[in-house]
Image (cartoon, rainbow, N blue to C red):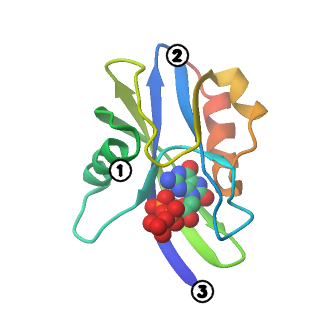
Amino acid sequence: MKYIEVVAAIIRHKEKYLCVQRGVNKYPYISHKYEFPGGKIEKGESHQQALRREIQEELLMDIEVKEHLHTVEHRYPDFTIKMYAYLCTSANDEYTLTEHIHGLWLSKNELERLDWAAADIPIVQGIMRSKG
Ligand SMILES: Nc1nc2c([nH]c(=O)n2[C@H]2C[C@H](O)[C@@H](COP(=O)(O)OP(=O)(O)OP(=O)(O)O)O2)c(=O)[nH]1
């Protein structure tokens, strides 16, 4: 079974969190799902470096990586991912989508409205339960 390690940025700006939607994918269970931006960690990269690179590529956005929030391991039918989620901040709410088909800023209590990738559900629940 393929195993991949992924970093995800929980980007918070003014009490809202940036959520992005994937386009069509060869795996139907991931197509059109919402996720936190990020991606695979490249060889030799730290989590922080991978996050800053991926967010620059996907959103043309500069972030500051704060604390580690959650690590989840999820087994999809074709591969398993280990995802490290970090709280991140941005100087403003501007972004340009280069890979995703939709993006939106939602407050904590609105997060559960979206159709999230299965691996993200424990992360979303963790954010919703968190204080502050
Ligand atoms: N970035 C990110 N990926 C997630 C999340 N949840 C989730 O299941 N994933 C999965 C989807 C992808 O299979 C994988 C992340 O890989 P990726 O975005 O770098 O790359 P990809 O498979 O879409 O594309 P490729 O690099 O193979 O062309 O992790 C999430 O919240 N953020």
Q: Left or right: where does residue 81 sit relative to residue 11?
A: right
For the residue marked with disc 3, what is the amino acid? Met
Task: Looking at the image, tell me whether mark 3 or mark 1 is earlier in sequence order.
Answer: 3
Q: Left or right: where does residue 101 sit relative to residue 52?
A: right
Q: Is mark 1 within 8 Å of ligand 1?
A: yes
Give the distance between the C-alpha atoms of the residues marked 3 and 2, in whole angstroms.
38 Å
**What residue would you read off at disc 2?**
15
Q: Nearer the viewer, mark 2 or mark 1?
A: 1
Disc 1: CA contacts within 10 A as few (<14), some (14-19) or many (>=20): many
**What residue would you read off at disc 1?**
54
Check if mark 3's residue and mark 2's residue have beta carbons within 8 Å: no
Q: Secondary structure at mark 2?
A: loop
**What residue would you read off at disc 3?**
1
Task: Looking at the image, tell me whether mark 3 or mark 2 is earlier in sequence order.
Answer: 3
Taking the image as drawn, is residue 5 in sight? no
Q: Residue furthest top?
A: 14
Check if mark 2's residue and mark 1's residue have beta carbons within 8 Å: no
Measured as percent of width and height from the top left, residue 14 is found at: 47, 13
Q: Nearer the viewer, mark 3 or mark 1?
A: 1
Measured as percent of width and height from the top left, residue 8 is found at: 47, 48
Image quarter of residue 66: top left
Please count the marks in the image: 3
For the residue marked with disc 1, what is the amino acid? Glu
- Residue name at image x 44 percent, y 57 percent: 39
